Image (spheres, rainbow, N blue to C red):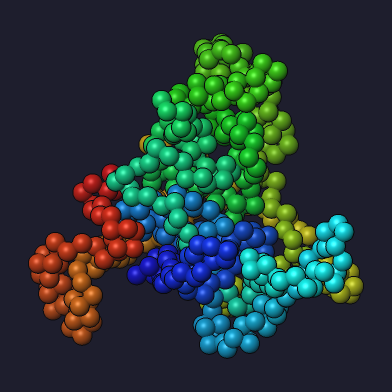
Amino acid sequence: LLSKHHVTLPTEHFWLPYQPKGTHLCFITPCLGPNLGSFCAFYGHVTDLVKHVCFQLVQALYFLHQKGLCHGDFRPANILFCLTEEVEKMGDDELVAALGGVQIAKLSRIPPANTTKRDMKEKEWPKELPRYLIGQADMIKLIRGGWCSPSVAVIDFGVSYPVTEPTGKGTGIPLGYAPPEEAITGRNQEGKEETLVKLGPKSDVWSLGVTLAELALDYFPFADSSDKLYGVKNMELVMGPIPEPFRSEFRTWYKGVWGPDGTALQDVDMVTDPETGKSVLSPLSFSIKRWKEEKQYAKEESGYEDPIRSKMSLGLETLHTKRSGAAIEAQWARDKTKLPSYTWGQTEEEEEMDDDQFPTKKFDDIEVFSDLLHSIFKWMPEDRVSTAEIMAHPWFKDRYAPSLDTKQEDVVSKLSQGTIGIINVMAGIPFKAGNFLFRMFSRVFGIFSNPLRFLWGGRSCTNRSNDLEAQ
């Protein structure tokens, strides 16, 4: 069930002694490929593949929310490619070879002052130091070798929390993926950091939106670093002036960090729009004049004031030449069971044959995709669309089947209420009779808890009547 909905959890765990003291927790997980961090660089020009991957992410988040769980750290680093069936059949030596071999570096000690190498050799090797280091596996080789499936798996539930218990504490997600309620926090009476608006499913939706922009456009809409002021400036360019309760708290934060010597934020809230003469809320990180100048500059460069549309109109700078990019598209068109393989670089003859070495991808769906992102990027969580609405958005029109999805979700919901024994019995019963018995057993055994509740600490999952996503 988890695999079908693009979710992967550890299958086992164990403890190892950890020198010089204590123990080390180890997890065993299914064997998976590299994360999606470099996806756009490799495959951003293959539109069908981009939508295929993005839709799986929406499905995964929809499934988690329906089961009563918020991820809390939804981003490409926590989403991995699955591997092809061929990899599952590989022996250890074959898999190591596919990863480029094992790199080992012997550890040695530098003699301190007034100590000879001979003295060092005679001393016992410290127990807390390893004898050698092993280099990290080059997972990108699995993509280049064509060993990765286009299916993805969402991992890392270390900061997840129940939908029914929205948290007032931040999850620690990097600023670039953090919604306003996570990026702009306050202090409680005890002086501890606390969110102004509690986190919930719509906080995950924001992170999903940033992830979609990164995978499709190689674009961070707000911040790609820890610069909070830069992030808020970009938020105001996309969503308009920052409202309360974030507005007052951001002023307080700014004064605490920069003091009187920093570049001042706008002191006033309401100003007169120089174009319309109406009283409007002022941006906090710009004067309204500067804010309009930024938008005008974007329009002159791309034809659009909106930063998202402006970015799309400028196109995607690919890392593939025209020839290699076309080869990757052709591979995907022939075989959609695995990611296309590729190699960097060309011979001199091939370079001469390419008229444009690194062509820029032009987008023909600017209005549709920007509409999707703008429906996600809202200051307040309640104004954002749900995962169900994202799946039904026109950008996914060739992948979303409402009738099929509804039936599938009903089956998932019912299966999760029963027991494994019921499922096994149903497998051998004709469809119509099975459907009748299935409904009967679901009513009888409906009191049993969802089997998945054990996977997240025994917390009860929501049902449709009180599920936030359903509302």
Is 335 positioned to the left or the right of 351 in the image? left
Q: Quadrant of the N terminus?
A: bottom left
Q: Position of residue 143 (x, y in %)?
A: 64, 72
Q: Position of residue 94 (x, y in %)?
A: 63, 87
Q: Viewer-proximal residue, 453 or 441?
A: 453
Residue positioned 90% across, 73% down in the render:
348
Residue positioned 20% across, 85% down in the render:
428
Residue positioned 44% across, 71% down in the render:
14
Residue positioned 44% across, 43% down in the render:
203
Rendered view: 447 above or below 367: below
Q: Residue 149 is drawn in which quadrant? A: bottom right
Q: Residue 128 is drawn in which quadrant? A: bottom right
Q: Position of residue 31 (x, y in %)?
A: 52, 75
Rendered view: 228 above or below 176: above
Is 73 positioned to the left or the right of 64 in the image? right
Q: Residue 136 is drawn in which quadrant? A: bottom right
Q: Quadrant of the C terminus?
A: top left
Rendered view: 203 above or below 123: above
The mark total stands at 0
- Asked if residue 398 shows in the view, the reply is no
Q: Position of residue 370 (x, y in %)?
A: 55, 44
Q: Viewer-proximal residue, 446 or 290?
A: 446
- Asked if residue 167 shows in the view, the reply is yes
